[in-house]
Image (cartoon, rainbow, N blue to C red):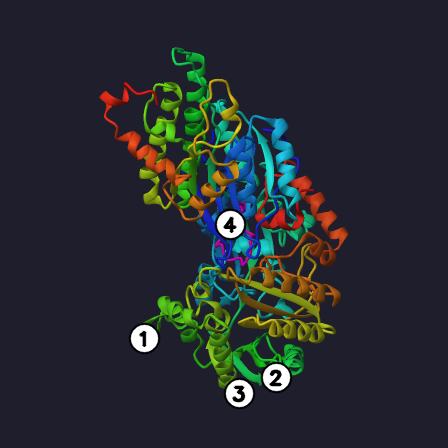
């Protein structure tokens, strides 16, 4: 007998960029049975259900305006951890923070992590996230040994690359639209030190930028580029490349010490005094073209010296967590991210065009991040043999229409160059665009699986309705 | 509730939506207000029992925009039991809710010596109980969301019980008091409640038998403009035309021993 009621559970939820609000009936299940209760309630009330983890997606992936949202952050137990084999079984609400803090002191590290540690495993699988090692390790889904999920029909399925393989490759990357993960078993990666050896080089233009990402990839475990997206002309695409390697054998004289948790945790204060949690307030005055232009230039100048240093895993990976609540510095309108994935052959020309458009129209991105990628076999994959560029844009009441028009042009450029998009990031992708880069066959396959797993169409998010419409 | 024929466009950060429900949308003020709010950028669920009028109204509104701005929901406000389901479906279709406007209302003009309970009952049901059925549900949603606006189109007739139409006065006085109560409950939760007192508006009401002569009557469009301004400025109590504020100020303050001998 269901004990859930809709009353008094209607809350306004937002995307991570605080640029979109969608109120929903929010429930926080603690176990699989409670997920089933929510499905039952949805069936009775005619509402739809979406899953939400940490709410870290830049778009509407975990929003369901007027419907039910299952906040899975309460299902956050690490069910089993075996430090001998490096296998971990966890509930979907376990965050990467919980995970790495559990496995790192014993010499393991999650094989794929996002730029923030606050994402949940369920969300990571639903979007099939990638890290700075995508060209080497693929997306997170490639390290999942097995998962169980509850389908809207109430059935429980267990999937692995060998068992229910079609569902395995579709539910990972399936945006939570086929079922809801209840337990995830993953393989961690062995590390021999708590530190990474990090190399930093300046790159002076877009060509050099991409050439560096391409050339350095074979020699490094991780690469990532920062791009000054506010400078045009000859310096268009300038920035800095960071590449890192694991330390092996005796490269780290005292791995026991460096792997200790206290050597990994990001300090909450700057210089030991200034609390980072309020830093974003001081960033607010810079959240305009002039301010960010100065910040980008200063960062570029500071990066001109090529250097090598050692850094903890957490410090290298979770750049986005250096300034807590940084997304609030973008003000009331919030921000959106536009990430495009382009084949290595066409990337340079396409991005040159896009960056020039954004500069010409006076709407430059304030932050650009580049990565190297390789394709994977998941159904709704965003990856390809090439590069990605993630651009952050500030949203204001005055610029929405102009920004929207510009992003539509970007879409055309990217599609024309054979590019792809990432459903955890872009908030304006239209059905026609998705059809073009995913292909008719993929979408038909997805719809077929959707019909099989969710015959009554109970699982729906704002993202699903936006991109896949009402079939 | 009819089956969903088409759907509202999805919201996104660069295409955010303002979402509203208008109950009683096919009447004079309701129609004008639907047009006005659509023009102000709202995506609207139009509720009325009059299916014949609702469809064309939506069509006419949507004609002016590239995307769907209004969809019809046929429902009778006196079917109180259906309101929770109806509101839930509408909010799910809209993807949220920012505004609920109750414009539905009926009036009968009894003769000076006529006491007609059936007509009084209808007026109380449509003007007051239907409003409470819808607004209670909406208030609960808005209270937990900590935002939103509720607008009730009451009447200057609720300011005083008068010889001409005790039943109508009662329904509107009750509505005004209910709105004030909601306002006092919800303001602390960030929800704004507006009482609109339109005075006379040139609608079909004034063509009814025994209807009084139109005094300072405004067009429905003017009334809609006034309501939109009240919403935009988050007002609390609004007389559509200023003259009614002064008239009612005087009327409210006429002592009973004089007022009961008067014919207004």
Give the Cα separation between the discs numbered 2 and 1.
37 Å
Near mark 2 (Cα within 10 A), the count class, few <14, some 14-19 or many ≥20, is some
At a point 39% along the width and 14% down the height, the residue shown is: B112
Q: Is residue A377 visible in the rendered structure shown here?
A: yes
- Disc number at residue A272? 1
Give the Cα separation between the discs numbered 4 and 1.
35 Å
Q: Nearer the viewer, mark 3 or mark 1?
A: 3
Q: What are the residue bounds of the magenta stretch?
A: A49-65
Q: Secondary structure at mark 4?
A: strand
Q: Earlier in the sequence, mark 3 or mark 1?
A: 1
Outermost residue, right side:
A441
At a point 72% along the width and 56% down the height, the residue shown is: A438
Q: Which residue carries the number 2 mark?
A: A235
Q: Is residue A56 magenta?
A: yes
Q: Nearer the viewer, mark 2 or mark 4?
A: 2
Q: Are marks 2 and 1 on the same chain?
A: yes
The answer to whether mark 4 and mark 3 are in CB contact below 8 A is no
Residue B210 or residue A396, whichever sits in front: B210
The answer to whether mark 4 and mark 1 are in CB contact below 8 A is no
Quarter of the image where one finds residue A155: top right
Q: Earlier in the sequence, mark 4 or mark 3?
A: 4
What main secondary structure does the magenta stretch of the protein show?
A: loop
Residue A230 or residue B261, whichever sits in front: B261
Q: Which residue carries the number 4 mark?
A: A52
The answer to whether mark 2 and mark 1 are in CB contact below 8 A is no
Quarter of the image where one finds residue A279: bottom left
Q: Nearer the viewer, mark 2 or mark 1?
A: 2
Q: Secondary structure at mark 2?
A: helix
Near mark 1 (Cα within 10 A), the count class, few <14, some 14-19 or many ≥20, is few
Using the image, name the chain to which the residue with label 3 belongs.
Answer: A
Q: Are marks 4 and 1 on the same chain?
A: yes
**In-image side of A33 versus B1 (left or right):** left
């Amino acid at each position: 007998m269901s004990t859930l009621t809709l009353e008094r559970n209607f809350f306004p939820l937002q995307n991570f960029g605080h640029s979109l609000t969608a109120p929903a009936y929010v429930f926080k299940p603690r176990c699989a049975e409670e997920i089933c209760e929510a499905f039952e309630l949805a069936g009775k009330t005619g509402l739809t259900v979406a899953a939400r983890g940490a709410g870290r997606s830049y778009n509407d992936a975990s929003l369901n305006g007027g419907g039910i949202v299952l906040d899975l952050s309460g299902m956050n137990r690490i069910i089993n951890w075996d430090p001998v084999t490096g296998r971990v079984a966890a509930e979907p609400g376990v965050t990467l923070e919980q995970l790495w803090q559990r496995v790192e002191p014993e010499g393991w590290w999650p094989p794929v992590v996002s730029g923030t540690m606050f994402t949940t495993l369920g969300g990571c699988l639903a979007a099939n996230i990638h890290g700075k090692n995508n060209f080497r390790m693929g997306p997170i889904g490639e390290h999942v040994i097995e998962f169980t999920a509850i389908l809207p029909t109430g059935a429980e399925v267990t999937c692995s690359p060998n068992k229910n393989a079609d569902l395995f490759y579709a539910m990972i990357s399936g945006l939570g639209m086929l079922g809801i993960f209840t337990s995830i078993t993953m393989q961690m990666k062995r590390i021999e030190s708590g530190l990474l050896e990090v190399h930093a080089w300046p790159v002076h233009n877009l060509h050099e930028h991409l050439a560096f990402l391409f050339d350095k990839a074979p020699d490094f475990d991780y690469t990532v580029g920062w791009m000054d997206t506010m400078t045009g002309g000859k310096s268009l695409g300038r920035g800095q490349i960071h590449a890192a390697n694991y330390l092996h054998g005796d490269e780290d004289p005292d791995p026991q010490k460096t792997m200790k948790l206290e050597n990994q945790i990001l300090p909450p204060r700057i210089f030991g005094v200034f609390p980072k949690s309020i830093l974003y307030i001081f960033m607010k005055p810079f959240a305009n073209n002039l301010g960010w232009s100065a910040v980008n230039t200063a960062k570029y100048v500071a990066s001109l010296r090529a250097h090598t240093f050692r850094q903890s895993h957490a410090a290298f990976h979770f750049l986005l967590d250096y300034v807590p609540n940084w997304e609030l510095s973008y003000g009331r309108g919030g921000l959106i991210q536009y990430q495009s994935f382009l084949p290595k052959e066409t990337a340079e020309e396409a991005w040159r065009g896009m960056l020039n458009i954004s500069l010409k129209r006076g709407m430059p991105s304030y932050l650009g991040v580049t990565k190297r990628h390789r394709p994977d076999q998941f159904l709704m994959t965003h990856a390809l043999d090439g590069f990605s560029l993630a651009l952050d844009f500030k949203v204001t009441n005055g610029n929405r229409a102009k920004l929207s028009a510009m992003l539509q042009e970007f879409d055309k450029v990217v599609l024309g160059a054979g590019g792809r998009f990432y459903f955890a990031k872009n908030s304006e992708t239209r059905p026609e665009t998705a059809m073009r880069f995913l292909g008719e066959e993929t979408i038909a396959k997805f719809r077929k699986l959707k019909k099989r797993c969710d015959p009554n169409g109970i699982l729906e998010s704002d993202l699903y309705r936006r991109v896949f419409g009402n079939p | 509730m009819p089956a969903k024929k088409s759907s509202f466009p999805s919201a996104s950060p660069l295409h955010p939506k303002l979402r509203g429900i208008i109950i009683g949308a096919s009447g004079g003020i309701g129609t004008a207000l639907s047009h006005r709010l659509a023009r102000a950028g709202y995506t609207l669920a139009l509720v009325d029992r009059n299916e014949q009028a609702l469809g064309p109204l939506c069509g006419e509104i949507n004609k002016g925009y590239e995307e769907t701005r209004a969809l019809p929901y046929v429902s009778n406000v006196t079917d109180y039991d259906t309101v929770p389901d109806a509101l839930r479906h509408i909010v799910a279709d809209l993807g949220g809710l920012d505004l609920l406007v109750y414009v539905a209302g009926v009036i009968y003009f009894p003769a000076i010596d006529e006491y007609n309970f059936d007509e009084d009952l209808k007026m109380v049901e449509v003007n007051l109980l239907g409003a409470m059925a819808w607004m209670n549900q909406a208030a609960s949603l808005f209270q937990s969301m900590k935002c939103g606006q509720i607008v009730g189109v009451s009447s200057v007739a609720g300011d005083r019980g008068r010889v001409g139409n005790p039943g109508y006065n009662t329904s509107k006085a009750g509505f005004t008091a209910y709105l004030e109560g909601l306002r006092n409950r919800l303001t602390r939760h960030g929800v704004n409640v507006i009482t609109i007192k339109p005075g006379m508006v040139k609608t079909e009401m004034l063509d009814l038998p025994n209807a009084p002569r139109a005094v300072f009557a405004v067009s429905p469009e003017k009334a809609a403009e006034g309501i939109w301004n009240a919403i935009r400025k988050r007002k609390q109590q609004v007389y559509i035309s200023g003259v009614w504020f002064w008239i009612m100020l005087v009327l409210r303050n006429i002592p009973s021993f004089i007022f009961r001998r008067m014919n207004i």
